[in-house]
Amino acid sequence: MARFDYDSWQAKLIALELANEVGRGILRELIASPHTASQLSEIMEIPLPTTLFHLQRLESAGLIQSKKALGKRLREVKLYSVPSAEIVIDLGGTTNDEE
């Protein structure tokens, strides 16, 4: 589970990506299974530079992770995945569990 303070730069970046159709689509695909940027670009029918832009933002925010793997032609590629499908934005204060 990814946990963020609501005033952090990561939470702001997450909000931007969740508000964006492409960001949500990439997350939806990566929750189902890991993909390369090229695979995501093809599946979602969007340009590769657009895909890479959103992947970089999602990875910077801590929502996705990448690892190096061997591609079809035995060349090194980045494989993106979602380590946790849960996101918690901490607004501060107490929760119902703490009362």
Image: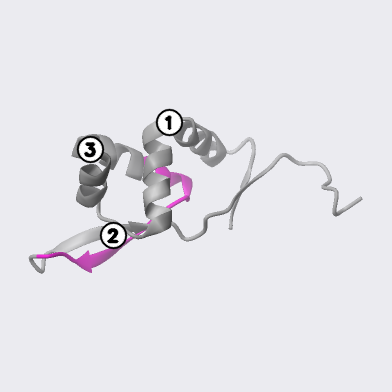
Extreme-right residue of the structure: 99
Residue 79 - label: 2
- Cα–Cα gap, marks 2 and 3: 18 Å
Q: Residue at image x 10%, y 69%?
A: 74
User: Which residue is found at the position 28% from the left and 59% from the top?
Assistant: 79
Q: Is residue 4 found left or right of 14 in the rendered image? A: right
Q: Is residue 99 left or right of residue 69?
A: right
Q: What is the spatial separation of the Cα atoms under label 1 and label 3, in whole angstroms?
A: 16 Å
Start-end of magenta stretch: 57-72
Dot 1 or dot 3, earlier in sequence: 1
Write down the residue under mark 1. Answer: 20
Mark 1 to mark 2 CA distance (whole Å): 22 Å
Image position of 37 with respect to 66: above or below: above
Three-letter residue code for mark 1: Asn
Where does the image place residue 53, in percent across and percent down from the top left?
A: 30, 37
> Can residue 59 be spotted in the picture?
no
